[in-house]
Image (spheres, helix red, strand yellow):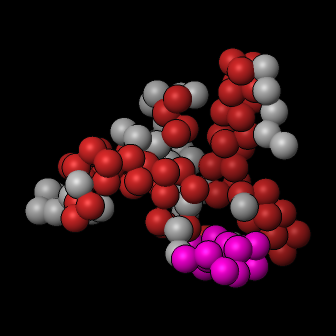
Amino acid sequence: MWRHIYDRIRHEGKVESISEMKTHYLKKVLPYAQSIQHDCWFCAYAFDRNVEEFGAGSIHIYPYPIAEAHEKTCKHCPAKLVDPKFNCQDPHCHWGEHPIQFYNKIRSMYRVWQAMTGDALK
């Protein structure tokens, strides 16, 4: 998905809504699938683990404040297995504000994962 977004931004030279680009991509690739949490595989995984930990009615962990809800959910982000300090909303590589930097961060984490596991995604 992020390669698709990266290529579109590089090719078109402009940035439309990153959320819309993610949604469009997922509908094209998985037209039969239900919506994925935040249109993000990492978030979907984290929310599933959050439900396992806090129960089915707690996807957004209300009545906690948003920041605390994110903290409880984001701790399950699979990217944290590679980089424990990973935060998709980091001001330097925020997925929506700086999608090229975010894509580069994901790629660098993938290279680290490859080195850690000796494996590559098929």
Viewport quadrant of the C terminus: top right
Within the magenta stretch, is there residue 21? yes
| Residue at 78% across, 20% down | 118
- The answer to whether residue 62 of the structure is visible from this angle is yes
Within the magenta stretch, is there residue 25? yes
Of 37 and 56, which appears nearest the observer? 56
Of 118 and 79, which appears nearest the observer? 118
Of 47 and 23, which appears nearest the observer? 47
92 is higher (above) or lower (below) than 40 = above
Residue 84 position, x and y percent, is: 46, 27
Residue 17 position, x and y percent, is: 60, 77
The span shown in magenta is 19-34
| Residue at 66% across, 80% down | 32
Image position of 61 (left or right of 89): left
Assign the magenta stretch its main secondary structure: helix
- The answer to whether residue 97 of the structure is visible from this angle is no
16 is higher (above) or lower (below) than 69 = below
Residue 71 position, x and y percent, is: 29, 45
* Residue 104: quadrant of the picture: top right
Instruction: Return the residue found at the far right.
Output: 11
33 is higher (above) or lower (below) than 82 = below
Residue 57 position, x and y percent, is: 22, 65
* Residue 74: quadrant of the picture: top left
Viewport quadrant of the N terminus: bottom right
79 is higher (above) or lower (below) than 54 = above
| Residue at 36% across, 39% down | 75
Image position of 33 (left or right of 88): right
